[in-house]
Amino acid sequence: MPNESDYLKLQALFARVAEEKHRRGELEKLHHQLVDTYTSLNRQYAELLSEYKHLRRYFGVTVQVPYTDVWTHKPVQFYPGKHPCEKPAEMLQQIISASSRPGDLIADFFMGSGSTVKAALALGRRAIGVELETERFEQTVREVQDLVSQNG
């Protein structure tokens, strides 16, 4: 942003060139009007930048989020009623924590045993699950309802 003195020189230059080319001058606003506009736009930019940073959840390693790009977790051990594709709860919690904020909606379209839904609820997220197998779906719904009523 030029200072007022330099802006007056620019106005004179643009006015002279515009007159020579039979065009309208482009720097007709007063300096304080430009400063007001600049200040307003700069404030809007800062607000939008803040909103963007709050909405965006990028993957990065910090002291608060000490994750790397390689995660190792022990597989889920067998137990009666274990779904064959069940993921470790710690891994799901790590994924959900790294990629969402409390109150966000987590969707699992292959719900199975509901481990993603359970991890999401434990971390204060909302969750929705979809499962094609009716029997498995009903069992998972009961488990999630029991979990919610225990922690409710």
Image (cartoon, rainbow, N blue to C red):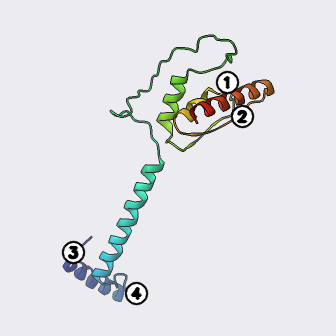
* Left/right of residue 19 with respect to residue 82 in the rendered view: left
| First in sequence: mark 3 vs mark 1 | 3
Q: Residue at x 79, y 24 (%)?
A: 135
Check disc 2 and report its element: helix, strand or loop. Answer: loop
Report the disc number at residue 24.
4
| First in sequence: mark 4 vs mark 1 | 4
Check disc 1 and report its element: helix, strand or loop. Answer: loop
User: Quarter of the image holding residue 28?
Assistant: bottom left
Report the disc number at residue 145.
none
Disc 1 packing (10 Å; few <14; some 14–19; many ≥20): many
Residues at circles 2 and 3 in contact by the CB criterion of under 8 Å: no
Residue on which disc 2 sits: 130
State the CA–CA distance, disc 4 to disc 1: 71 Å
Q: Residue at x 30, y 86 (%)?
A: 16
Q: Is residue 3 above or below residue 144?
A: below
Image coords of residue 19 (percent x, y): 35, 89
Q: Quadrant of the N terminus?
A: bottom left
* Left/right of residue 40 with respect to residue 91 in the rendered view: left
